[in-house]
Image (cartoon, rainbow, N blue to C red):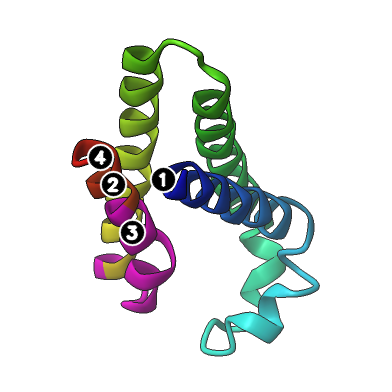
């Protein structure tokens, strides 16, 4: 049950990322990413929206995994999307900011461990 709650939480995070990057990039972005030059938010709006769309796909896959009744398929689908989230979080931590590891990759890695060892 903890595993499913964590997967739901991770899916919720990615739905928030979708909202933020697709619809609030130029309004909330400058308040959150203070080191990013404020004049670049409008110019990078299409790029952020594209990232938001990908986050939406990750959330959709994780939510889908919660509704699969076959245990083997549920495990495989959730592991696939959790691995995608982990890789994205690790890459973000290495290329953008280290705190992305704690926000994105670490919860997914914990969920992977719970899935594999439960």
Secondary element type, mark 1 = helix
Q: Quadrant of residue 116?
A: top left
**Residue on which the image places disc 4:** 118
Image location of residue 118, percent across then percent down: 25, 39
Secondary element type, mark 3 = helix
Question: Residue at coordinates 32% horizontally, 29% vertically from top-left?
Answer: 80
Asked whether the beta carbons under mark 2 and mark 4 sit within 8 Å of each other, the answer is yes
The magenta stretch spans residue 106 = yes
Mark 2 vs 1, N-terminal side: 1
Q: Residue furthest left?
A: 117
Question: Residue at coordinates 51% horizontally, 16% vertically from top-left?
Answer: 68
- Label annotation for residue 3: 1
Q: CA distance from mark 2 to mark 1?
A: 6 Å
- Can residue 96 be seen by looking at this rendering? no
Q: CA distance from mark 1 to mark 3?
A: 15 Å
Instruction: State which mark lies toward you, 2 or 4.
Output: 4
Mark 3 vs 2, N-terminal side: 3
Task: Identify whether 64 is placed above or below 1.
Answer: above
Q: Nearer the viewer, residue 74 or 90?
A: 74
**Residues drawn in magenta:** 94-110
Asked whether the beta carbons under mark 4 and mark 3 sit within 8 Å of each other, the answer is no
Q: CA distance from mark 1 to mark 4?
A: 9 Å
Asked whether, in this view, residue 64 is left or right of residue 104, the answer is right
**Residue on which the image places disc 3:** 105
- Label annotation for residue 114: 2
Mark 1 vs 3, N-terminal side: 1
Q: Nearer the viewer, residue 38 or 57?
A: 57
């Amino acid at each position: 049950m903890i595993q499913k709650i964590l997967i739901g939480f991770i899916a919720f995070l990615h739905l928030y990322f979708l909202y933020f990057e697709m619809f609030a990039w130029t309004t909330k972005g400058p308040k959150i990413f203070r080191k990013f030059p404020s004049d670049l938010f409008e110019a990078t709006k299409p790029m952020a929206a594209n990232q938001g769309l990908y986050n939406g796909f990750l959330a959709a896959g994780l939510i889908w995994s919660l509704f699969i009744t076959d245990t083997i398929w549920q495990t495989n689908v959730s592991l696939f999307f959790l691995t995608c989230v982990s890789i994205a979080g690790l890459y973000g931590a290495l290329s953008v900011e280290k705190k992305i590891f704690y926000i994105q990759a670490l919860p997914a890695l914990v969920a992977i461990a719970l899935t594999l060892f439960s």
